Image (tube, coloured by chain):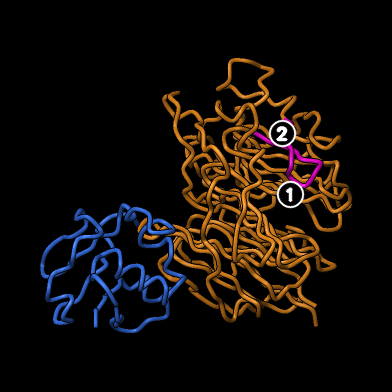
């Protein structure tokens, strides 16, 4: 189980309270997590990254295990703690943009 | 008893303001989509329960919301606005070529007769249409693809397509306006376009006959007389009597002919309203007095409307999409300010009262007249 934490304005948009829990078959990467997230919540398409898996929006960041993964290749494996569900994958609104 | 529903888009959410036909007591609902910029909210003329809202943020981009119950509940619909074909370039502020980049939807114009059909005016300037209630959007690319498109430059607020007027009499005729390219007309439902800017004089353009490059702030039309158009330009208030083929200035005795909105009385096609603003640098009313000006002669001769509006120390602006009129027998006029007030007049502008005083900066105001 993958745990995902969204910023408040996206939780409101998707009508989510708390964390999102995703089951992913195959490699757990930033791309596969976001693909699964957008498949469950289609209204999030285009709000975190471009449509159809496009690049990360400029004022969105991705954190996990106290590391900034925003510039890491999207197909790299996520840390084991994220894959094991002991640490969440964080989608963060940067301190800018509004 | 009939009533009205005012739809206010603000910097930090949308508000729905409702009243009966007296327009004295108001119920305020909101903020909807709190924290997001709501550039525009508009209802379908064919189904007053169907509303569309443009929601955007610097973090998360564009969302389109739809309500099927007059704003009580909302659901996000499609938000993919992809320019069709070769994207191309327009001019950047410094004159260099700059690729078209979608930023946001400024204006949503529902069809006059089909609640599932909506036109969207976007920044960077382009026109999109949905035929499925907002689930998917397709560009009408010939406007952006006009031969002059590569020479268009953004205004200070961005290169936005902010005005869409649908001609109720002539099927397929529509008007759009872009800052700072000018006004355009299509006679074939958006398949082809041509600039309609003859007679506009803009001090920032050296060529007095320039076909494009004019900073048109707003167009307005009375549905009973769609060949007559009114325009608030960056500077100058203008009028066309031939569907935009030519324009003449009607600024007359206005204290300033700079401003943003312009609108037409619901029952008097020659009664029009503007809100003079001091200048392009000073975006507040002259002398700190918030005055709506009304002409009952289709321009040139204007009277200030001040009753109920602040006449000292008022330094707000009224943005281009922030004025609307209802169609009750005694026509109501509404406008919102960057200071967060929404003012209403139930007597054609003779007197005014605030519906609300302390909203976030108001970006847009629309009104629906309800049975």
Q: Position of residue B352 (x, y in %)?
A: 66, 62
Mark 1 vs mark 2, CA separation in Å: 22 Å
Using the image, determine if residue B36 lies above or below residue B155: below
Outermost residue on the front side: it is A26
**Of residues A19 and B274, which is closer to you in this image?**
A19
Apparent colour of chain B? orange
SS label for mark 1: strand
Chain of the residue under the numbered disc 1 shown in the image: B
Q: Quadrant of residue A81?
A: bottom left
Residue B33 coordinates in the image, percent (x, y): 47, 71
Name the residue rendered at 48%, 57% in the picture: B339
Which of the image's four quarters has the C terminus of chain B?
Answer: bottom right
Region rendered in magenta: B182-196
Give the secondary structure at mark 2: loop
Q: Is B88 above or below relative to B81?
A: above
How far across and down, in percent of the image, does residue B127 sit? 63, 47
Residue drawn at the location 80% of the way across and 35% of the way down: B240
Residue B304 in picture, x, y percent from top left: 69, 47
* Quadrant location, the N terminus of chain B: bottom right
Q: Residues within 10 Å of mark 2 (few under 14, many from 20)?
A: many
Residue position marked by numbered label 2 in the rendering = B251
Tell me: A98 left or right of B289: left
Task: Answer left or right for B335 relative to A24.
Answer: right
Nearer the observer: mark 1 or 2; the answer is 1
In the rendering, which numbered label is found on residue A79? none
Q: Which residue is mark 1?
A: B165
- Of mark 1 and mark 2, the one earlier in the sequence is 1
């Amino acid at each position: 189980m993958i745990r995902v934490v969204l910023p408040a304005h996206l939780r409101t948009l998707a009508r989510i309270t708390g964390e999102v829990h995703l089951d992913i078959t195959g490699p757990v990467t930033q791309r596969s997590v976001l693909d699964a997230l957008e498949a469950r919540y289609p209204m999030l398409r285009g709000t975190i990254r471009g449509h159809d898996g496009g690049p990360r929006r400029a004022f969105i960041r991705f954190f996990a295990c106290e590391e900034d993964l925003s510039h890491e290749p999207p197909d790299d494996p996520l840390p084991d703690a994220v894959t094991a569900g002991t640490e969440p994958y964080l989608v963060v609104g940067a301190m800018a943009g509004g | 008893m009939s009533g009205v529903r005012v739809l206010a888009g603000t910097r930090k959410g949308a508000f729905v303001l409702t009243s009966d036909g007296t327009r004295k007591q108001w119920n305020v609902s909101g903020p909807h989509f709190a924290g997001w910029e709501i550039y525009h909210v508009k209802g379908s003329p064919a189904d007053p329960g169907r509303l569309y809202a443009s929601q955007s943020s610097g973090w998360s981009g564009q969302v389109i919301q739809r309500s099927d119950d007059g704003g009580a509940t909302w659901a996000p619909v499609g938000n993919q606005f992809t320019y069709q074909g070769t994207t191309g370039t327009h001019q950047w502020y410094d004159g260099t070529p700059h690729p078209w980049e979608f930023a946001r939807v400024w204006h949503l114009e529902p069809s006059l007769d089909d609640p599932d059909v909506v036109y969207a005016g976007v920044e960077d300037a382009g026109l999109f249409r949905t035929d499925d209630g907002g689930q998917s959007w397709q560009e009408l690319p010939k406007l952006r693809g006009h031969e002059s498109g590569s020479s268009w430059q953004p205004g200070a607020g961005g290169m936005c397509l902010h005005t869409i007027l649908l001609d109720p009499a002539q099927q397929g005729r529509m008007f759009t306006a872009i800052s700072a390219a000018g006004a355009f007309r299509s006679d074939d439902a958006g398949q082809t376009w041509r600039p309609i800017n003859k007679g506009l004089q803009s001090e920032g353009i050296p060529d007095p006959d320039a076909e494009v490059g004019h900073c048109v702030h707003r167009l307005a039309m009375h549905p009973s007389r769609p060949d007559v158009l009114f325009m608030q330009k960056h500077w100058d208030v203008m009028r066309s009597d031939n569907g935009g083929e030519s324009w003449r200035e009607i600024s007359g005795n206005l204290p300033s002919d700079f401003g943003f909105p312009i609108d037409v009385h619901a029952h008097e096609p020659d009664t029009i309203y503007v809100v003079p603003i001091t200048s392009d640098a000073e975006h507040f009313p002259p002398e700190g007095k918030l005055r709506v000006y009304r002409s009952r002669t289709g321009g040139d001769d204007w009277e200030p409307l001040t009753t109920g509006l602040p006449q000292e120390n008022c330094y707000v602006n009224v943005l281009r999409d922030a004025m609307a009129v209802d169609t009750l027998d005694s026509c109501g006029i509404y406008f919102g300010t960057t200071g967060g007030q929404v003012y209403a007049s139930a007597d054609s502008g003779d007197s005014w009262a605030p519906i609300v005083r302390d909203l976030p900066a108001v970006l847009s105001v629309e009104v629906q007249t309800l049975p």
